[in-house]
Image (tube, rainbow, N blue to C red):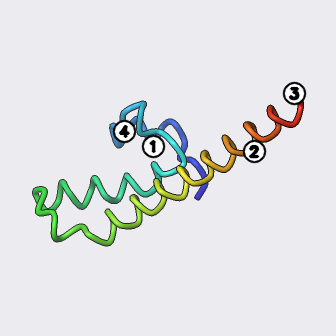
């Protein structure tokens, strides 16, 4: 998903460290948590979607790091 605009992130009070490509999944998760008074079993779909996004972003970063390391080793 595309990153959310700054205005939406400000309105939803998303902290700076959470303003990444997965913030679009965090907004509905936080709303669900607020509406259900943090009953964790009621927001599992939203939580799993957010965690999946976080995992996929982590995998992308690791692939980039692996490619950069291979390029650095090849240039030596």
| Disc 3 element | loop
Q: Is residue 51 above or below residue 10?
A: below
Which numbered circle lies on residue 67? Answer: 2
Whole-percent x, y for residue 72 in the image = 80, 32
Q: How far is disc 3 from disc 2 in space, using C-alphas?
A: 15 Å
Given the current orientation, which residue lies at the most extreme top position? 76
Q: How far is disc 4 from disc 2 in space, using C-alphas?
A: 32 Å
For residue 31, side relative to residue 62 (left or right): left
Q: Nearer the viewer, mark 3 or mark 2?
A: 3
- Residue at 36% over, 33% down: 15
Counting every numbered tag in the picture gives 4
Which numbered circle lies on residue 8? Answer: 1
Q: Are marks 4 and 1 in contact (CB under 8 Å)?
A: no
Task: Work out which quarter of the rendered image holds the N terminus and state it.
Answer: bottom right
Q: Earlier in the sequence, mark 4 or mark 1?
A: 1
| Disc 4 element | loop
Q: Nearer the viewer, mark 3 or mark 4?
A: 3
Q: Earlier in the sequence, mark 1 or mark 2?
A: 1
What residue is pinned by disc 4? 14
What residue is pinned by disc 3? 76
Q: How far is disc 3 from disc 4 in space, using C-alphas?
A: 43 Å
Q: Is residue 42 above or below residue 62?
A: below
Whole-percent x, y for residue 31 in the image = 27, 56
Q: Earlier in the sequence, mark 3 or mark 4?
A: 4
Q: How far is disc 1 from disc 2 in space, using C-alphas?
A: 34 Å
Q: Nearer the viewer, mark 4 or mark 2?
A: 2
Q: Residues within 10 Å of mark 3 (few under 14, many from 20)?
A: few
Q: Are marks 4 and 2 in contact (CB under 8 Å)?
A: no
Q: Is residue 42 above or below residue 11?
A: below
Q: How far is disc 3 from disc 1 in space, using C-alphas?
A: 46 Å
Q: Is residue 56 above or below residue 61?
A: below
Whole-percent x, y for residue 38 in the image = 13, 56
């Amino acid at each position: 998903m595309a990153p959310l605009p700054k205005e939406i992130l400000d309105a939803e009070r998303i902290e700076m460290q959470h303003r990444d490509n997965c913030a679009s999944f965090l907004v509905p998760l936080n709303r669900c948590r607020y509406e259900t008074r943090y009953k964790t079993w009621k927001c599992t779909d939203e939580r799993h979607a957010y965690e999946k996004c976080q995992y996929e972003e982590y995998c992308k970063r690791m692939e980039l790091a692996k490619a950069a390391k291979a390029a650095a080793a090849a240039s030596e």
